[in-house]
């Protein structure tokens, strides 16, 4: 980047003074308000274009570093070397170069030349391409954000739907198990009651046999056993059915 010294009056700075200044594009030096007056009145420099130091500071740094004088011999460039494609003065570096042209011819109406217009158009097209691409990418970002939100929502809804289905399935299975358990429990309770009743009947028959053996005749025991046998036979059949 250009030295900060360039932002002050070159003449005053040489005297140890630093004042705000204007930049002469031809002389490539800074002038303060006092120094620029004689410069603007001089016959040689009155047509020189100047700009404020603020405008100069707003120039790109590479523009501030451009010098129209040769660094080797401090002479102003007057020629253009077509071979090296650069402005030059006659020095050892360009003594063997053949295609030398007056720099003034090369620089004639550069700002309005077709090459500048073409370059500006290329930059404009490039800028439009970048703007279009940036707009497209931003649109895509917005689209994928929307898509992401939608997919996350769908997954959440699917999860809820699956949960609801599983909850219902779980409840249906539990209800079915409860129903079957209640029926089985009732059936088994009923069976226990029937078996308890049959066991009581058998207990009664055992008691009857004991009494018959103790108190009645042989004939009565025989006949009684026949009756008890019928009852036990029926009880056995019922038990097998159970």
Image: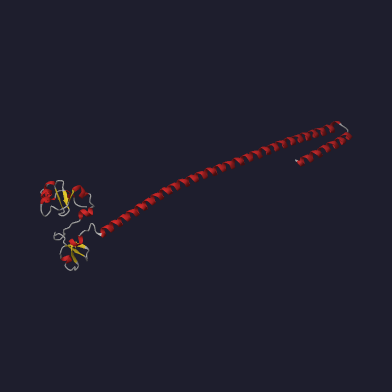
**At 84% from the left edge and 33% from the top edge, which residue is drawn?**
212
Q: Is residue 130 left or right of residue 67?
A: right
Please indicate, yes or no, whether residue 40 appears anywhere in the rendered image: yes
Query: How far from the left and from the top, in percent, is residue 91?
Result: 15, 64
Q: Is residue 50 left or right of residue 147?
A: left
From the image, which quarter does the C terminus lie in? top right
Could you say which is closer to the camera, residue 104 or residue 166?
Answer: 104
How is colour applied across the structure in the image?
Answer: secondary structure
Could you say which is closer to the camera, residue 55 or residue 152?
Answer: 55
Q: Is residue 23 left or right of residue 217?
A: left
Query: How far from the left and from the top, in percent, is residue 10?
Result: 13, 50
Query: How far from the left and from the top, in percent, is residue 109?
Result: 21, 58
Could you say which is closer to the camera, residue 12 or residue 53?
Answer: 53
Q: Residue furthest right?
A: 219
Please indicate, yes or no, whether residue 12 appears anywhere in the rendered image: no
Query: How far from the left and from the top, in percent, is residue 172?
Result: 61, 41
Q: Residue 70 lies in what quarter of the image?
A: bottom left
Q: Residue furthest top?
A: 215
Q: Is residue 106 left or right of residue 35?
A: right
**At 65% from the left edge and 38% from the top edge, which residue is drawn?**
179
Q: How many marks?
A: 0
Could you say which is closer to the camera, residue 199 or residue 27?
Answer: 27
């Amino acid at each position: 980047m250009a030295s900060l010294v360039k932002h002050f009056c070159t003449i005053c700075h040489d005297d140890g003074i630093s004042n705000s200044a204007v930049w002469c594009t031809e002389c490539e030096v800074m002038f303060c308000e006092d120094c620029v007056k004689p410069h603007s009145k001089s016959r040689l420099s009155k047509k020189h274009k100047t700009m404020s130091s603020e405008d100069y500071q707003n120039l790109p740094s590479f523009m501030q570093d451009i010098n129209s004088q040769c660094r080797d011999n401090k002479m102003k460039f007057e020629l253009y070397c077509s071979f090296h494609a650069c402005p030059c003065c006659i020095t050892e570096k360009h003594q063997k170069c053949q295609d030398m042209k007056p720099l003034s011819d090369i620089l004639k109406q550069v700002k309005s030349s077709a090459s500048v217009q073409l370059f500006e158009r290329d930059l404009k097209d490039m800028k439009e391409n970048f703007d279009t691409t940036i707009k497209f990418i931003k649109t895509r970002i917005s689209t994928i954000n929307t898509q992401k939100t939608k997919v996350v929502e769908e997954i959440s809804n699917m999860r809820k739907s699956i949960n609801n289905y599983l909850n219902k399935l779980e409840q249906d299975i539990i209800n079915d198990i409860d129903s079957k358990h209640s029926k089985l429990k009732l059936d088994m309770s009923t069976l226990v009651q029937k078996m308890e009743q049959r066991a009581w009947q058998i207990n009664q028959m055992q008691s009857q046999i004991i009494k018959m053996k103790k108190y009645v005749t042989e004939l009565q025991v025989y006949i009684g056993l026949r009756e008890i046998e019928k009852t036990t036979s029926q009880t056995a059949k019922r038990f097998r059915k159970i």
